[in-house]
């Protein structure tokens, strides 16, 4: 597979966002921002540990995540073309989401199980993790990072190509071949930017929300205030990430043109 250019993908991403930002924004607001706000208002204190522990709100966050996957696939459809309406792009994302989820689970589920077995006390009681468990957990995290980078283009494959889960894995693996460090740099840069932005916005919104409306309890105005700001930033970051992935996929697949989506009017 040829070398991918992050700078070219970024230039194309800016072109797509500048020209079609309203269409992509409509999808992001409906399928990323709104579900995230609802989940954040219902349980503003949700953490990785509480998600792993299960419970009613964990199911809510799972549903929110699945809706978000539909949104990502829809945005990729718009970013790649051919021209389509926003409604058709969302319908396309809904059709492809189960296949994409199945493909993701094929490589991710074994690692999640290993993490659950050997790192089960990682969040709630780190001192209870033995040396062997800690070593295996570190190895699993390293494999998870490696596979995440190798599979980073799988969402674009799922949206653009009508493949089954196994074929989707093989295609994503082939597209990322020889480009691991470039894709890792992309994930690292965007991930760092996301952590900084979300951390800053979350901290400021949390302080202001608590001063104006009190403690952010479930279904409170304070929780709504914080969720609105943090999920808006999250939706913006997700949109940039998804369009960038689409343009990297376009490079690897030999698609040279930037599509012009249609609003459906």
Image (spheres, rainbow, N blue to C red):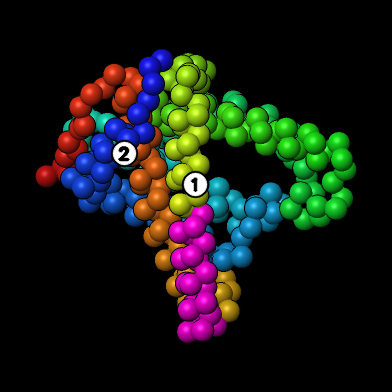
Q: Position of residue 264 (x, y in %)?
A: 16, 42
Q: Which residue is mark 2?
A: 10
Relative horizontal placement of residue 48, taking residue 248 as reference (left or right): right
The residue depicted at 32 percent of the width and 24 percent of the height is: 251
Residues drawn in magenta: 195-214
Q: CA distance from mark 1 to mark 2?
A: 15 Å
Give the quadrant of the C terminus.
Answer: top left
Q: Nearer the viewer, residue 85 or 152?
A: 152
Image coordinates for residue 123, horizontal then vertical, percent: 74, 53
Q: Residue at x 56, y 74 (%)?
A: 216
What kind of element bears circle 2? helix
> Residue at point 68% right, 29% down?
110
- Is residue 233 shown in magenta? no
User: Left or right of 126: which side holds 64?
Assistant: left
Above or below, comparing residue 89 to residue 192 in the picture: above
The image shows residue 32 at horizontal and vertical percentages of 41, 51
**Which residue is label 1 attached to?**
191
Residue 242 horizontal side relative to residue 201, left or right? left
Residue drawn at point x = 48 percent, y = 72 percent: 204
Can I make out residue 93 in this image? no
Examine the structure image and report whether residue 200 is included in the region drawn in magenta: yes
Locate residue 215: give its quadrant: bottom right
Q: Residues within 10 Å of mark 2 (few under 14, many from 20)?
A: some
Dominant secondary structure (helix, strand or loop) of the stretch shown in magenta: helix
Answer whether labels 1 and 2 touch (C-beta < 8 Å): no
In terms of sequence position, does the residue under pointer 1 or pointer 2 come before the other?
Answer: 2
In which quadrant will I find the N terminus?
Answer: top left
Q: Residue furthest left?
A: 265
């Amino acid at each position: 597979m040829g070398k991918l250019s992050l700078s070219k993908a970024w230039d194309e991403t800016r072109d797509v966002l500048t020209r079609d930002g309203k269409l992509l924004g409509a999808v992001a607001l409906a399928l990323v921002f709104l579900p995230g706000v609802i989940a954040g208002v219902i349980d503003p204190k949700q953490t990785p540990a509480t998600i792993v522990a299960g419970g009613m709100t964990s199911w809510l966050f799972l549903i929110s995540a699945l809706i978000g996957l539909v949104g990502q696939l829809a945005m990729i459809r718009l970013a790649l073309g051919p021209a389509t309406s926003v409604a058709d792009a969302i319908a396309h994302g809904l059709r492809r989401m189960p296949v994409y989820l199945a493909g993701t689970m094929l490589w991710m589920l074994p690692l999640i199980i290993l993490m659950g077995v050997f790192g089960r006390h990682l969040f709630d009681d780190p001192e209870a993790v033995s040396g062997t468990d800690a070593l295996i957990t570190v190895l699993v995290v390293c494999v998870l990072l490696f596979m995440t980078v190798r599979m980073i283009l799988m969402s674009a494959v799922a949206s653009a190509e009508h493949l089954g889960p196994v074929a989707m894995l093989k295609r994503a693996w082939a597209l990322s071949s020889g480009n691991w460090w470039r894709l890792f740099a992309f994930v690292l840069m965007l991930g760092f930017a996301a952590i900084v932005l979300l951390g800053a916005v979350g901290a400021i919104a949390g302080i202001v929300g608590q001063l104006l409306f009190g403690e952010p309890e479930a279904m409170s105005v304070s929780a709504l205030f914080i969720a609105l700001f943090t999920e808006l930033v999250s939706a913006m970051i997700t949109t940039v990430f998804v369009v960038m992935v689409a343009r990297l996929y376009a490079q690897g697949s030999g698609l040279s043109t930037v599509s012009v989506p249609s609003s459906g009017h």
